[in-house]
Amino acid sequence: MKKTILTTLCVLFSVCALFAQTPDSNPDFDFSVEIHPNPKPTIRPKTIVNNDIEAYYLYGELSLTFNVDLGNADIVVTNTTTGESWYDSVNGVGATSITLSGDEGYYEIYIYTDCGDYTGTFII
């Protein structure tokens, strides 16, 4: 009986340790970031689809592609773990890249446009 309980506890702790592992601390890995329209109402509402803005993180840079003309866009990226923030502005259809510190943490992206607000998050 003791052997069964001990085996069960070992398996349980192994599974918990597997789920508790942190993501790779190397900031050079890449991944895409989902950007979503903010659900709060805007002054000038417009139908917004998820493909309006694409975001991708690679080698410490966050690349943003604006697939439709959303007018003036102010971008704020914040590492909520360290408190660092980065800012950029774009206008119309196009792309921009923001060089981040690459520090580990939880990052929030806020994009304020003439046609509505967008948000996204990712973890390094």
Image (tube, grey):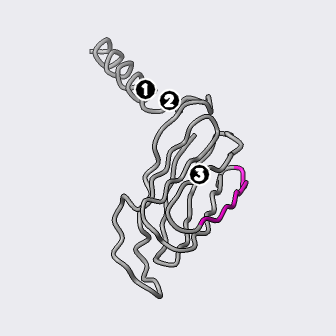
Tell me residue 51's x, y (percent): 37, 58
Q: Which residue is mark 2?
A: 21
State the residue lying farthest toward the top: 3
Pointers 1 and 2 in contact (C-beta within 8 Å): yes
State the residue lying farthest toward the bottom: 43
- In the picture provided, is 87 more to the left or to the right than 16? right
Instruction: Between label 3 and label 1, give the one nearer the viewer.
Output: 3
> Magenta stretch?
82-90
Nearest the viewer among 75 and 78 is 75
Instruction: Between label 3 and label 2, give the one nearer the viewer.
Output: 3
Q: Residues within 10 Å of mark 1 (few under 14, many from 20)?
A: few
Q: Which residue is mark 1?
A: 18
- Residue 24 painted magenta: no
Residue at (55%, 72%) from the top-left corner? 112
Instruction: Estimate the spatial distance between the alpha carbons at disc 1 and disc 2, rounded to whole Å.
Output: 6 Å
Tell me residue 25's x, y (percent): 61, 30
Q: Amino acid at mark 3?
A: Tyr
Q: Residues within 10 Å of mark 3 (few under 14, many from 20)?
A: many
Disc 1 is placed on an element classified as: helix
